[in-house]
Image (cartoon, grey):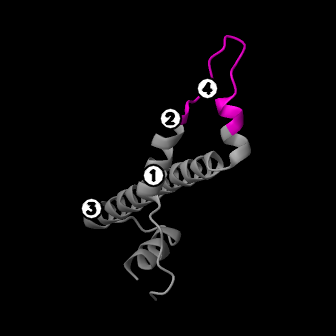
Amino acid sequence: AKLDDYQAKKKNGERLNQDQLVSKTVKKSLRREQLQREEMEQRRLKMVLELQFLLDRLGEEEVRQDLKRPEGDGTSVLTDADLTTLDQFYKLLGPDRNYDVR
């Protein structure tokens, strides 16, 4: 309501007093901070979803075999031990759900 009043005064050519200017500045600052928090949360969620997708793909047998296949120098990208470690990590991130509980 106050912001609408400020905007109406501004349209009519009236100048805002110091309190009104401070209030307007504070509101803009709070809104900017809220948008920054939302952007950070979106980036965090994107990273989590990308990690989940990657870990899901590492559970596919074809992908696992490709990663264990030796390269030209005779070494593989990942070993069985590496894949076991990633499997344990996956279980920590996404524990089994009990679908009987609602």
Q: Quadrant of residue 70?
A: top right
Residue of label 3: 18
Amino acid identity at mark 2: Asp
Q: Which residue is mark 1?
A: 40
Q: Is residue 100 magenta?
A: no
Q: Amino acid type of disc 1?
A: Met
> First in sequence: mark 1 or mark 4?
1
**Mark on residue 82?**
2
- Residue type indicated by callout 3: Gln
Label 2: how many residues lie within 10 Å, few (<14), some (14-19) or many (20+)? few
Tag 1 near tag 2, CB within 8 Å: no
Q: Percent from the top left, x then y, of residue 5?
A: 42, 79
Residue at the spot 44% in from the left edge and 64% down from the top edge? 95
The label nearer to you, 1 versus 2, is 2
Q: Earlier in the sequence, mark 4 or mark 2?
A: 4
Mark 3 to mark 4 CA distance (whole Å)? 64 Å
Which label sits on residue 77? 4
* Secondary structure mainly formed by the magenta segment: loop
